Amino acid sequence: MPRMVRIVLPGYPHHIVQRGHNRQVIFAQEEDYVGYLANLQELKLTFGIGIYAYCLMTNHVHLLLQPGEAVADLGAFMKALAARTTRYFNRLEGRSGTLWESRYKSSPVQTEQYLLACCRYVELNPVRARMVAHPGEYRWSSYAARMGGPDCEWLDLDPMYLALGQDDATRRERYQTFLEDAIPLGEWALIRESVKRGQLTGNSRFVEAVEQIVGRRIERRGPGRPQKAGLETE
């Protein structure tokens, strides 16, 4: 089956998931997480990529990134980030070969309707996986930085988050309320399936607008098979 053409839009956020090859463990010790975040921080400056949210799970990562006008920078950023992690892992384990799945998955996100929802989806990933009861208990996501933690100076605050209030305290309080609100029916399924299938995270108007930008029709596939109970969440 031919690969789907990846859609990358300048100036739009993109939800990205990259998984370990054959779901192998990527992050086993604290230094694994720390090293990945250090590379994330350095490479965002090199390639001019905005980072709105992240979550490092045991065998995969979620990133919410925004490229600038040069859309090729997003792919170059992901390639450099994956290569650094692979070199580190291979050096540590005394091995060679691939660490990641052959292709990361990505989905452009409709800013007004779904950007804040995608932030919530990413930062609640450890809660959905039943690793913690509250996102504040998980060290390796952007939630702590958003709430004023030590890495807050390099996390970029997206326009929808900034619109929550005029000051940091108000925005944090309202975002916390947003995280605790009931999730609208179908929201998580839409976000999950969109990134899994390389489709757009947005409504029909967003799809039509992007079709005008890229000059072609964008197919929207139905959901795949239901996930089996007990598998780690995406």
Image (cartoon, rainbow, N blue to C red):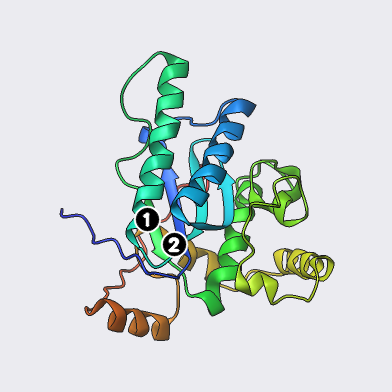
Residue 141 position (above or below residue 188): above
Q: Amino acid at mark 1?
A: Asp
* Name of the residue lying farthest toward the left: 1
Q: Is residue 62 left or right of residue 8?
A: right
Q: Amino acid at mark 2?
A: Pro
Q: Residue at x 66, y 49 (%)?
A: 127
Task: Give the x, y percent position of residue 228.
Answer: 45, 47
Q: Residue beneath label 2, please?
A: 67
Task: Give the x, y percent position of residue 9.
Answer: 37, 69
Task: Give the x, y percent position of residue 176.
Answer: 76, 64
Q: Is residue 162 left or right of residue 25?
A: right
* Name of the residue lying farthest toward the front: 46
Residue 72 position (above or below residue 138): below
Residue 187 in view in this figure: yes
First in sequence, mark 2 or 1: give its number: 2
**Could you tell me how many numbered marks the image carries?**
2
* Name of the residue lying farthest toward the right: 169
In depth, the one of 137 and 187 nearer the eye is: 137
- SS of the residue under disc 2: loop
Q: Residue at x 37, y 36 (%)?
A: 100
Residue 134 in view in this figure: no
Which label number is shown at residue 73?
1
Residues tagged 2 and 1 counted as in contact (Cβ below 8 A):
yes
Q: Is residue 5 left or right of residue 11?
A: left
Q: Quadrant of residue 137?
A: top right
- SS of the residue under disc 1: helix
Label 1: how many residues lie within 10 Å, few (<14), some (14-19) or many (20+)?
Answer: some
In depth, the one of 52 and 42 nearer the eye is: 42
Residue 87 position (above or below residue 47): above
Label 2: how many residues lie within 10 Å, few (<14), some (14-19) or many (20+)?
Answer: many
Q: Residue at x 81, y 71 (%)?
A: 167
